[in-house]
Image: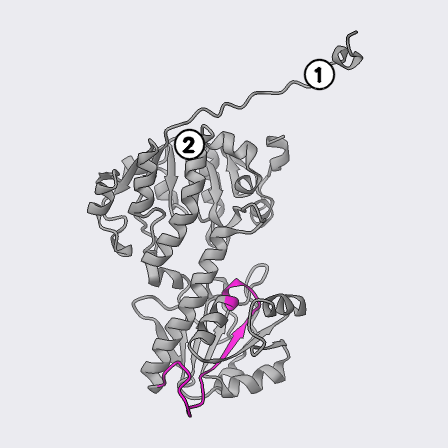
Amino acid sequence: MQNISQLLPQEECLAVSNEQQSLKIGLPKERTFQEKRICLTPDEVAVLVTNGHQILVEAGAGEEAHFPDADYSEAGAEIVYDTEAVFACPMVLKVEPPTTEELAYFNPQTVLLSALQLNTQDIAYFEMLTQKQITALAFEYIKDEAENYPIQQSVDELTGIAAVLTASELITEENRLLFGNITGVPPIEVVLLGANNITEAAAKAALGLGANVKIFASSLTDLRELRTHLPSSVYTATLQPQLLRESLKRCNVLIGAMTGTHRSPIIVTKDMVQQMPRGAVIVDTSIGNGGCVETSGLTTLEQLTFTKYEVVHCGVPNLSSRYARTASTSLSNILLPYLLKIGEEGGVENLLQIDKGFRNGLYSYHGILTHSTVSEWFGLPCKPLHLLFL
């Protein structure tokens, strides 16, 4: 006897083709100020080529990260001297978001994988994405199976370690002090602002060099979480101005990593800086969002510091790019599995359907804005992802 449920109207299920697709990926040279990284190293390019994908690398794209064109050529990539030809690929990988001039080279329906860096964008960027019907994913929004943000975590970890290593160099240059713990000699005193991935990495690096570490943050919950990843010897406290002021009077190195909704809050005032020891070093990793130290200012990889109130200030917004080869390798390691999966699943469209974490990185789908944060920031219309991917 036929089951009555079989006689009822059934929901139509659309088949998703997962036939292997050969990708054509463009790797343009980064032209943004101070950006030295590249999305794929020659090793990862070799894996992609072996899996049947075509990689176009703009001549000199990896030079700043010490990956010469010859390495990419040997890995199977095509070295291209025409910038427009690289941007004309169906898929483009960039570290920094493309400029509007670079977007003009894109073909309609191109897929873009890059950072978004919302606070540096303007409305013209999103208007051009719409005009070109670009499908764009932001590195910083992509999630993994554990609901973490793997690319952002990697950047934060590198930034924290880079801040300590940079401070180590500067404290030696300014005070002839060794960033370490020598028998009979008081260790370096390090103060960290914020309880996040950057300060966790910075704390581990500073402790590894033998420093005394104090961490101040606004959230007790975040401090408790951070404590579970660090030795019990690390001092933690909420942001009490008088307590922070007393700690800064004795510290050799201050590393700021505070975040805010639109800009970083000012935690360390001018008066506090004036009371710091002569030759102390401030590395403000939150300078890209305005900085959390009142006296902070932008500096460059070529001119790392300036001195104010006899305190050395470093305010490089992209400090990880100082270690471009390491940063590129880390980014490349994370991107490779996604690119292989895109090919295996038959293209970006199919992977967006089945991988919720990858889909979380989507902010433009064929020119339709899909990310609520971007929509709220610029007051643009937005179509929620759940209406596009059922």
Q: Dot 2 lies on which element?
A: helix
Q: Does the magenta stretch include residue 181?
A: yes
Dominant secondary structure of the magenta stretch?
A: loop
Query: What range of the chain is rendered magenta?
Result: 177-200
Residue 341's x, y, as percent?
A: 45, 36
Quadrant (top left, top right, bottom left, bottom right) of the C terminus: top right
The image quarter containing residue 25 is top left
The answer to whether residue 275 is seen in the rendering is no
Which disc, if any, is residue 10? Answer: 1
Left or right of 265? Residue 28 is left
Q: Which residue lies furthest to the bottom in this view?
A: 184
Kind of residue at disc 1: Gln
The answer to whether residue 380 is seen in the rendering is yes
Q: Is residue 190 magenta?
A: yes
Q: Residue at x 54, y 46 (%)?
A: 144
Residue hosting label 2: 343
Kind of residue at disc 2: Gly
Which disc, if any, is residue 366? Answer: none
Q: Specify which label sits upstream in the sequence, 1 or 2.
A: 1
Left or right of 36? Residue 197 is right
Q: Residue at x 24, y 53 (%)?
A: 63
The image quarter containing residue 263 is bottom right
Residue 2's x, y, as percent?
A: 77, 8
| Mark 2 crowdedness (10 Å alpha carbons): few <14, some 14-19, many ≥20 | many
Q: Dot 1 lies on which element?
A: loop
Residue 18's x, y, as percent?
A: 48, 25
Q: Residue furthest front?
A: 1
Judge whether 290 appears above or below 375 on screen.
Answer: below
Viewer-proximal residue, 359 or 379? 359
